Amino acid sequence: MTLSTLRRHASRTPLYGLARRALGACRRAAYRRKTARFLREKTGVADQLPSGAVYETTMRCNLHCDFCWVGDLLNLEGEWREELPLQTLRSAFPDKVGFGISLTGGEIFMRKDILDVLRLFRDKGYTLGYLTTNGTIINEQRAEALADLARSGFLKHVSISIDGPKDVHDEARGAKGTFDRTAAGLRRLQQAIERNGGTHLPISINTTVTHEGLDALDGMVDVADELGIDAIGLNHLMYSTPDEVQETLRMVGEDDPAVIQTYVTSDPGLRSDTVRAKVTALAGKCRERGIRLGPRPQVSDAVMDRYYEPGAALAGRCLYPFLNARVSFSGKMYFCPLIRIEVGDLTQQSLQEIWNGERYVELRRRLLEHKLFPVCRRCCKVELSPDPV
């Protein structure tokens, strides 16, 4: 029995569950303490530096998925290849040991110098909270490098995007054999971890509630078992209506709908009762198999009906822009993942100089004033309240 298999069995024990809940309680308490000042003062001014940053390392990808919005919506100026060089990364990002960095894309391994980027952040003393990948081009060299970065304590989590069982995934990705390529890349990574002494590196598979994949949603548990994965990240569909986009633009003082980067529709094609049944079945199957399930956002049963009703108001808050910077592949910093209002440019200023700049602070202040902008109601970062609006 491999070390990874032993860990999967250990993670299913009651003691492990108690430890995770205790750790979660500690983290929630720390979060409340950290955000108390922002809520009390309501000025929009954050701390001197964010807790961390999400860096979109590249917008290039080796797949051409019909449903993917990244290439069209995030690549606002056609700057596909204007990725920040290493020297700019080194000077623009802060010298702060323990700073949190997470990497996404595009497909991060399409960037030729991605391993150098990872090592640069490691050498700064950062912690890599997660990196996302489709897994199809994790070769032996990259697998060994990731295992080494995990062994050093730098890399904490790898999230691999999978849309369902093999046939569902291949259809969603538009090419037969994609699932097998992802599985092969994952196996290379798992084997490299074993060769590096069995360093604990949490690996999760990430999937989204969609009309096309809903019937196969609980099949993700079988996929996790097949791939030796003990955690599933479930994204509820992020969407906004055209009216919510226009109301948000009014609130933030913008007139270009292109700055709102989410799926815009008057009908997401999902019924709350069907979603509730499918998610409940998935959760039950996860409990039976000892697989952790992490929904984003946390959509309680009391909220589910309004979440999947287009235009329905939802109560809650979002403090993401007070804690995390969003850095694009070209160095532009944006207010948040969905509201792509430029607040600075790392080719011109450092991250610290941008972080409490005038436009950034004003947008944060407006966010506190409104508690949520309409397009924030169905974002993976939102904290939803079960109380109706």
Image (cartoon, helix red, strand yellow):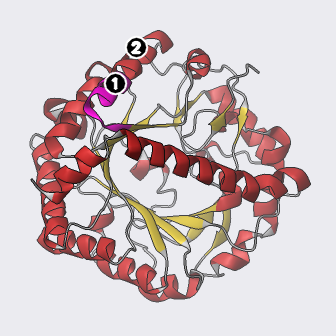
Residue 193 on image: x %, y %: 20, 66
- The amino acid beneath tag 1 is Leu
The image quarter in which residue 205 lies? top left
Q: Which residue is mark 1?
A: 282
Query: Residue 18 vs residue 25: left or right?
Result: left
Residue at 27% in and 70% down:
146
Which residues are drawn in magenta? Answer: 283-292
- Give the structural element (helix, strand or loop) at label 1: helix
**Towards the viewer: 44 or 362:** 44
Residue 285 sits inside the magenta stretch: yes
Residue 47 image point, x, y percent: 76, 68
Which residue does the numbered mark 2 point to in the structure image? Answer: 277
Residue 63 visible to the viewer? no
Q: Amino acid at mark 2?
A: Ala
Q: Earlier in the sequence, mark 2 or mark 1?
A: 2
The structure residue drawn at horizontal position 40% and vertical position 28%, both measured from the top left corner, is: 209
Distance from the alpha carbon under mark 2 to that under mark 1: 9 Å
Q: Is residue 155 above or below residue 19?
A: below
Q: Chief secondary structure of the magenta span?
A: helix
